[in-house]
Amino acid sequence: MQQPALPEPVRGRPSDLKIEARELLCTRDLLITLPAGHTGRPAERIAADLARDTIADAPAARAYGLVDHVTVDHLLVDHVRENRDASLPPQTPR
């Protein structure tokens, strides 16, 4: 999650900057209220988490409540297993 921001340096007419700032605040409000409604977390917590960049892998996003489930590409999993098994030395029976 990343808080919305204007590109820097900020340039333009004051009236245009005011419009951009208003749009930025609307976007920020959406980025707080939507996850708060879906995750069950308080809006204050979402706002605090949004104040700093938050990077999450799939399981962390699920734990946070941003996604409902994580799917796995079974072809990729099979490929990794095949390559991992091919790189292992043959096992000798005991």
Image (cartoon, grey):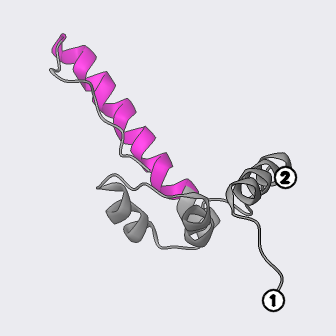
Tell me the amino acid under the disc marked 1.
Arg
- Look at discs 1 and 2 and give the one toward the viewer: 1
Query: Is 21 covered by the magenta stretch?
Result: yes
Where does residue 69 sit, x and y in percent of width and height?
74, 63
Q: Where the C terminus falls, by quadrant?
A: bottom right
Graded by Cα atoms within 10 Å as few (under 14), some (14 to 19) or many (20 or more), the crowding at tag 2 reads few
Q: Residue at the top extreme?
A: 13
The part of the chain drawn in magenta is 12-34
Graded by Cα atoms within 10 Å as few (under 14), some (14 to 19) or many (20 or more), the crowding at tag 1 reads few
Which residue is rendered at x = 29% and y = 55% of the image?
52
Q: Is residue 39 above or below residue 6?
A: below
Label 2: which residue? Answer: 74
Where does residue 88 sit, x and y in percent of width and height?
69, 62
Front residue of this view, candidates 29 and 87? 87
Which residue is rendered at x = 73% and y = 50% of the image?
83
Question: Disc 1 and disc 2: Cα gap in Å?
Answer: 32 Å
